[in-house]
Amino acid sequence: MKKLLLLLLCGTPLFAQETGSPIAEKKNEVRLDVLSAVAYGKANLSYERFLSDDWSVGLTGSFSFSDKFDKDFDRGYRNTLPKTEIIPYVRYRLSDSFKSYYFVEVFASLNSGDYKEMIRDSNGATAIYRINKEGYFDVAPGASIGYKVYFAEKFVLEFLAGAGFNLLDPDKSPDVVTRLGINVGYRF
Amino acid sequence: MKQFIKYLFATSLVLSLFSCDDEDGFYNEKYVDTTQLVTIDGDSEFHAGENLYVGSSIPRYISEPGFSDLLDIYGTTGGATAFTFSYILEKQDIDGEWIFVDFTDVSIDVQEGSAENGSFILAHAEYSQTTDEYNYYGGIPLASAGEYRLSFGVNSDSTNEVEFRSESSGNNINLNLISDMAGLDANGYYHFTVLP
């Protein structure tokens, strides 16, 4: 952790202008989110296409493989089980440097999963409570802030924090979709 | 840079708190208010050497506040084999202090259901296919004379009510029946005297 902070603190100065950077000439990047894999049991892959020096667009796809979350859902410790997420995003680079820079993004999370609730079933004379499970799908527009640092002009380490709010079916889907990640990737 | 790191951590913290909004709680738990599921045999006076019998008889179909139909508690719990509740006995010493009566090495006269005894009694009202009822009937010996009180608040959030919890298997619904009981004071104690 100390090394991580040191890396961030000693990064390239915020407004160091670079021109003709070899990094900027590479227009594609793929990344894997190690934080989601370890902490949330989610496979999370991203692709980013650099349209200009400052603007880029991308797509993140993730799906859950966490057995623990499945069990927690079945045992009733949670009432939603997010499963898949597709996130198109647009980013704007805030810093001048290409080797390390801050960025902001807007995104739309198309997320789906399972939802459960307890319902009362009655036949008129008697009733039981039972758990009703169904799927949900929702869209959460949101925003994030992040920081990238490149090594050897092609390997990238990226920190990302953001959130969006589900709009279509908030009674069933989670209110908030978080976008937290520590990504490692390759730019080409 | 430092400000950014602070912002990052602060944001993460706030978002983590927000993300807990829908996730807290236990979604397989159901609480239902009901009435008079526990009875105590006898009145407020006993004699040393007698047993104090606590009984419970819970029908499979019970009325539920706000509904005209009956709630099937056996069906709701996926066929729970029993409902448990607990109680403790205290005796007043010569200084007026209430002292727990320990039942660890005491024989409990259980005639229906089952019980586990230690510093408190954990009673299991067991289901009978024949009667479609959950039943418990157990007697604790009253060894010596004095002032006593029973409390049903142990292992429960209820103070002056008795809380039954279904012994549901697997991921079935855990049904909690919250029952009032005749004879309890405002603090949830049932007082009685044991004469020599």
Image (spheres, rainbow, N blue to C red):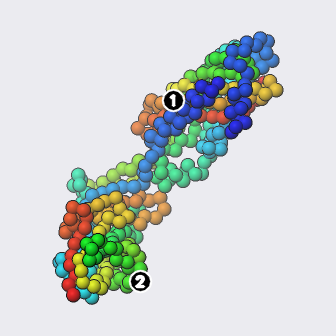
Q: Are marks 1 and 2 on the same chain?
A: no
Residue at image location 44% in from the left, 40% down from the top: B21
Q: Is residue A152 visible in this depiction of the protein? A: yes
Query: Up-down: is B74 above or below B44?
Result: above
- Nearer the observer: mark 1 or 2; the answer is 2
* Residue wearing tag 1: A164
Q: Percent from the top left, x then y, of residue B156? A: 35, 62
Badge 1: few (under 14), some or many (20 or more) residues near its Cα, within 10 Å? many
* Residue wearing tag 2: B105
Q: Secondary structure at mark 1?
A: strand
Amino acid carrying label 1: it is Gly
Query: Up-down: is B24 above or below B83?
Result: above
Residue at image location 41% in from the left, 47% down from the top: A117
User: Which residue appears farthest toward the front when viewing the image?
Assistant: B95
Q: Percent from the top left, x then y, of residue B158? A: 31, 59
Residue at image location 23% in from the left, 52% down from the top: B66
- Name the side, left or right, on which A165 lies relative to A124: right
Badge 2: few (under 14), some or many (20 or more) residues near its Cα, within 10 Å? few
Residue at image location 38% in from the left, 64% down from the top: B155
Q: Chain of mark 1?
A: A
Q: Percent from the top left, x then y, of residue B192? A: 21, 76
